[in-house]
Image: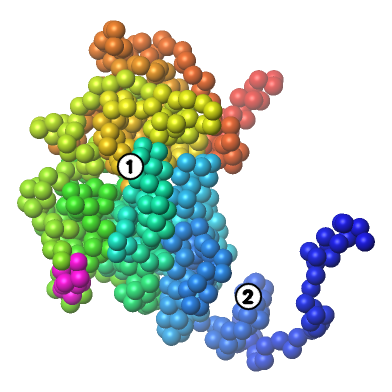
Amino acid sequence: MSTALASLNDLLQSPDDLYSLRTKGEGPRGKLPLSSEYLLDAPSGDIFGMTQSAGMGWDPNQLMREQVLILSTMGGIRAEDGKPIALGYHTGHWEIGLLMRAAAKELDRLQRLPFAAYVSDPCDGRSQGTTAMMDSLPYRNDAALVLKRLIRSLPLRRGVVGIATCDKGLPAMMMALAGSTTLPGVIVTGGVTLPPTDGEDTGKVQSVGARYAHGEIDLDYAAEQGCRACGSAGGGCQFFGTAATSQAVAEALGMTMPHAALAPSGEIVWKDLAVQSARALTTLIDRRLTMGDILSDDAVHNAMVVHAAMGGSTNLLLHIPAIAFEAGRRRPSVDDWNRVNRQVPRIVDVLPNGPVGHPTVRVFLAGGVPEVMLHLRALGLLKLDAITATGERLGEVLSWWEKSERRLRMREILQREDGVDPDDVIMPLERARKKGLTSTVTFPIGNIAPEGAVIKSTSIDASVVDPDGVYRKLGPARVFTTETEAIAAIKGRGAKGTTVKPIQAGDIIVLMCRGPLGSGMEETYQLTSALRYLPFGKQVALITDARFSGVSTGACIGHAGPEALAGGPIGKLRDGDLIEIVVDRINLVGTINFVGTAEQRLTAEEGAAVLAQRVPTVVLQADAQLPRDTRLWAMLQRCGGGTWGGCVYDVDAIIETLEAGFQARTVVGD
């Protein structure tokens, strides 16, 4: 026997009972609940849909119930005992099948006909520092498209329950439901992972490589901490990054049940939220309240206010405008974000912002989003007439929460189990001020980023901020065009056989060509996490046209616009250029300017003139590994307003741009 045949025999060997198969089946017993009128008037698809439902085993007598669709981002194959048969991409989608099951059972109990479908989501943590990050933000748009198609592909659905947890899956789910303006809808957030009893959180543990490179930890410590960082099998990370912020924003928009965001995954309180949400959806259906009623301009305002009060991820500057756009509401501008952040104090102490940095489950136990909103209501910062997924107005929901047993008992659990005063997690305004909490984000502008940039200014290490609340830095640029080069310099070690000049205290890292056109606007958390947990890191700043993970901290300025590949001045910076950064954390204003070299100082205006005349000294090009479909995403979102517009697909703007191109091509052809 030839080697090939032997190999095929081994590969294709089969069990003995392989040939015990059927060629026909009896089919379900019973009858479809058809009437003469229905048979004559209904589309054939509606009738065949019942045939399919009966074929899957549902009682045919119940097939005229109202149909409700449950959508999720479930991933992996989980055995009944919770053990993995096949892994998911991340803990955030690992357990949400349990939420789907709980919602479906409640819908069945309420005499509805539940359907379920899935669009799984990637893990931004798993993608950090890899080419997978080039698909992260584009995935959000594509997943939203597929989710909307799934909603429309169930023609008789009367409402939608959307279940999602993490960085891109949850924003995509919110966009999909927001775009279904004529349907009732409810979001169920997938909650959070518990912190380990003894170990590093999932934010800090992502810096083990950099700390090991600098001798801060040994190999055994890195291996042990990397293994134990997840205290439970499901939920988003334990810090208030993009996943957790998205959960809080979903609740602030009114899309969830009260006190839903940040529930500990796998716990009874977590699963009960799916049951509540199923009940709420049937109420919305009966009352004819839709996503269009819930997602008002007032709801968008409330989401921005809660984002500021909780110290949310800067990635929501991309997601909230996208959700508003899908809902047909006005997209918030940079001016709107500036106004809100100047009005709204940060009052939550949560990882990564500090000062203590409590895990997200403590924020949930301290009262979560409704507790934050009680403080904001007292300050007159909320739109209380906004409708929520309960069917009631926000003001009424907050009045219920204030007097609820749930509020009292959750706060008691936090005090008893962790020894933490809930008011040290979600603080009254005066306590927050005494502890030095500052407002969340600042939008610096200058000759490096004339269209603006963003920094989570509240997370700059207080020890490098001057007594007047202003962060000031003047230092030499270290220019990189890939994240791989930048992290190598931070670690102080190049690729095998090469040397690299290490990053040192005082440097300002400039990472260019990593915006939408260059890399799909990748996250750069491996850089920011390394800087946070290395001793010299707080003395280093970072400016990039990329974006940051929601858990990023420090003097890290992202979204610099225009990006290098769109002709932005950031692309003309050179190694050794002197850069001046000023960020006023009190008044929320800032500048980032090229101000000459060590040999010749320039004013900001003079620096702008020099940059305008300069030719780039490094090759400005998209990453060689940038996928073609990410390149397509980059151009389409550019038509829709780009980064500051939420990176959306504005179909009218895209068509207008294409038509102009067709006409120009025709003129040239003539």
Q: Dot 2 corresponds to which residue?
A: 49
Q: Residues within 10 Å of mark 2 (few under 14, many from 20)?
A: some
Q: Is residue 243 above or below residue 83?
A: above
Return the x and y of residue 49 as percentages of the image width and height.
Answer: 63, 75
In-image side of 269 versus 132 (left or right): left
Return the x and y of residue 503 as percentages of the image width and height.
Answer: 36, 28
Measure how far apart labels 2 and 1 are at the Cα level.
Answer: 61 Å
Q: Which residues are magenta?
A: 407-418
Q: Dot 1 corresponds to which residue?
A: 216
Tell me where residue 350 sits by quadrant.
Answer: bottom left
In-image side of 473 versus 296 (left or right): left
Who is closer to the viewer here, 366 or 339? 366
**Marks 2 and 1: CB-CB under 8 Å?**
no
Q: Residue furthest top?
A: 600
Q: Secondary structure at mark 2?
A: helix
Residue drawn at x 23%, y 61% is 363
Return the x and y of residue 224 as percentages of the image width and height.
Answer: 39, 56
Q: Secondary structure at mark 1?
A: loop
Q: Residues within 10 Å of mark 1 (few under 14, many from 20)?
A: few
Who is closer to the viewer here, 352 or 627? 352
Q: Residue furthest bottom?
A: 30
